[in-house]
Image (cartoon, rainbow, N blue to C red):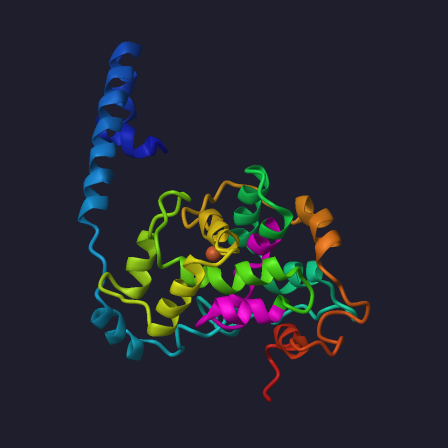
């Protein structure tokens, strides 16, 4: 548990009061204070009320953007910033550095996949699985798969395309539970649309079911702000499995080159 020193000292009556206590009394007070804090946190979590689908819908007209806009296109706060231009023949690593950064979520997912000894196709899928959210959010599994399909192994594409579907369906044997985050962002009474239901039915009996399932298992929502992650541990896997075009992503005339160009130049008006 994180100790808020100031709050703790204040709870004892300030530094002057603390200086009069012997070390045993201080230790007892700290233990007591931590127990109370933990109880409060547990109670707060239990009381956490998730919005309904109708409540989320009512928020639409309170915004000047749509929730599906890619992160590069909306600023969380204030105006958007000028982007550093991409190099002439941009690589995947350049996009990570200049357009996907800080990319903590995907780097953390891939780090977990690497540490738990998953296949290189799954590690690569974890590294790339949500990058397309910078471009667009709805149906990001399909968009993401399309963005990377010309360059990566078929299994990784399959994993990226379908992780979006499997996130809605728990599989405790595989170690995946429905995330609280989804109650929060979709509403507690949300039912996935029919195309997601149909895709789930197809996946359940698919020989590659575990590829997207493992992406969901590594898909960490409990973001650890202290974790230091980098793309460096994945350079070899990228080198082996990502067919980097020599002209650069976007200049290569692949079926998704236009998507890379849009990511490179999100300020283009047309
Ligand atoms: Fe995702
Ligand atoms: Fe994710």
User: Is 8 within the magenta?
Assistant: no
Q: Report the span colored magenta.
A: 123-147
Q: Is residue 168 left or right of residue 152?
A: left
Query: x, y percentage for residue 49?
Result: 20, 55
Task: Say which of 186 and 153 sits in front.
Answer: 153
> Where 184 sits versus 81, above or below?
above
Q: Residue furthest right?
A: 246
Looking at the rendered image, the quarter that the N terminus falls into is: top left
Considering the image in quadrants, where does the C terminus appear? bottom right
Going by the picture, which residue comes out furthest to the bottom? 270
Residue drawn at point x = 34 percent, y = 52 percent: 170
Side of 246 relative to 18 (left or right): right
| Residue 36 horizontal/vertical position (percent) | 20, 30
Across and down, in percent, residue 139 comes to 45, 71
Rendered view: 253 above or below 103: below
Please say whether residue 20 is visible from this viewpoint.
Answer: no
- Magenta portion: prevailing SS class: helix
């Amino acid at each position: 548990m994180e100790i808020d020193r100031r709050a703790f000292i204040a709870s004892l009556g300030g530094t002057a009061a603390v200086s009069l206590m012997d070390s045993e009394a201080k230790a007892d007070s700290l233990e007591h204070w931590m127990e109370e804090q933990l109880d409060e946190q547990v109670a707060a979590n239990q009381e956490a009320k998730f919005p309904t689908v109708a409540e989320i819908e009512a928020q639409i007209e309170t915004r000047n953007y749509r929730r599906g806009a890619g992160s590069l296109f909306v600023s969380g706060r204030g105006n958007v910033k000028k982007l550093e231009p991409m190099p002439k023949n941009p690589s995947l690593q350049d996009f990570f550095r200049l357009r996907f950064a800080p990319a903590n979520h995907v780097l953390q997912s891939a780090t977990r996949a690497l540490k738990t000894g998953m296949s290189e196709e799954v590690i690569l899928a974890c590294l790339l699985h949500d990058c397309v959210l910078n471009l667009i959010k709805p149906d990001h599994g399909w968009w993401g798969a399309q963005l990377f399909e010309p360059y990566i192994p078929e299994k990784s594409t399959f994993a990226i395309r379908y992780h979006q579907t499997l996130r809605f369906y728990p599989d405790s044997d595989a170690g995946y539970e429905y995330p609280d985050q989804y109650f929060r962002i979709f509403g507690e009474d949300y039912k996935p649309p029919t195309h997601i239901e149909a895709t789930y039915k197809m996946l359940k009996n698919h020989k590659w079911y575990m590829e997207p399932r493992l992406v969901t298992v590594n898909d960490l929502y409990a973001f650890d702000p202290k974790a230091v992650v980098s793309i460096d541990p994945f350079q070899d896997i990228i080198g082996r499995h990502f067919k980097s075009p020599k002209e650069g992503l976007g200049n290569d005339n692949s079926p998704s080159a236009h998507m890379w160009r849009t990511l490179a130049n999100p300020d283009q008006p047309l």
